[in-house]
Amino acid sequence: MKQTFWKIELVIPRATAYIFEGALKSFSIATSSFEMKGSDCWQLVSYSATIPDRTSLTAAIAIAAAAAGVNEPNIICEPLPETDWLAENRASFEPKRLGKFYICPTHYKGTVPANDKVIWLDAATAFGSGEHESTAGCLLMLSRLARNFRPKRILDLGCGSGILSIAAAKNWTKKIMAVDIDPEAVKVTRANARMNGVHAYVTVKESNGLAGRWAAQAGPFDLIIANILSGPLIKLAANLAGHIERSGFIVLSGLLSHQRSAVLNAYRGHGLLLVKTYRLGDWVTLLLKRPEGVLARKA
């Protein structure tokens, strides 16, 4: 018996794509966003292996719309014709240079730049292919840090596909703890780390933030990367600040430009200083540092 897959489609303001992707996470096995030419809107397409529960789906989208401060989008939910939709999605993923990194789908047969750090990655069932501005901002920030920073212990909080852990491993070949609350992300990160030949450096763990004994045993960290949403970033400020080593750096992303001040103030309240801001479209990536001589506080 052949399995029928389902497509969920939304048209949303560009700046809200990350929020709606999160809302669809529990329903889908893969999600893609597409720019609509001549419009400030994006088409968000998510794929499900089963018929989505309409009541739950509608409620999730309503909550996301309220969080984003926009009207609820129209939801198109329909079965897909029998086709290899994931292969088609992967085929549309083209190589992309971000700083010193060159992100390539595994089907790519062209030449890769000799001096770039190549990351082989397919569009799959966990977030993070370098296409989204928040991920791109993190990769650019890691490129900047690699010029004169040599961390020994690195944390990738909310690792998704593992792209940032892989980038960090290729930068520094040091121990990296990759953490995500989603078991699928843990699985995908492990596979991608192995495919890129950095699995010896990347330890992957399913965890809700820094909860658990593992955080105290693995940290404090010289570098923490957290590409999640502004709300969780603010809630985690004390915890992240408590696990960063003196003279360590924190890279924060997944926040919109109007959320920058709130997130930054939360971390300044724990002694961290702003070093650099990257803005790509409506998305912001922050680089923060703990000043010399200020010890990490366990939170």
Image (cartoon, rainbow, N blue to C red):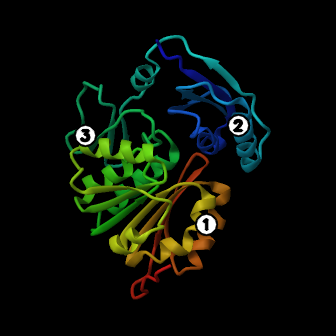
Indicate the quadrant where residue 243 lies. bottom left
| Residue 192 left/right relative to 75 | left
Q: Position of residue 15 (x, y in %)?
A: 65, 43
Tell which of 283 and 225 is nearer to you.
225
Rounded to the nearest angstrom, the CA distance separating label 2 from label 1 is: 27 Å
Which residue is outermost to the front? 1
Rounded to the nearest angstrom, the CA distance separating label 3 from label 1 is: 34 Å
Q: Determine which of the numbered discs, if any, sits on residue 234 in the image.
A: 1
Q: Residue at x 49, y 71 (%)?
A: 240
Q: Residue at x 47, y 78 (%)?
A: 242
- Give the amino acid type for the residue marked by disc 2 in the picture: Ser
Which of pointers 3 and 1 lies earlier in the amino acid sequence? 3
- Give the amino acid type for the residue marked by disc 3 in the picture: Met
Which of pointers 2 and 1 lies earlier in the amino acid sequence? 2
Tell which of 116 and 182 is nearer to you.
182
Q: Position of residue 213 (x, y in %)?
A: 40, 71
Marks 2,1: beta carbons within 8 A: no
Q: Position of residue 30 (x, y in %)?
A: 50, 32
- Tell me if residue 209 comes above or below residue 196 in the rendering: below
The residue to which callout 2 is attached is 56
The residue to which callout 3 is attached is 195
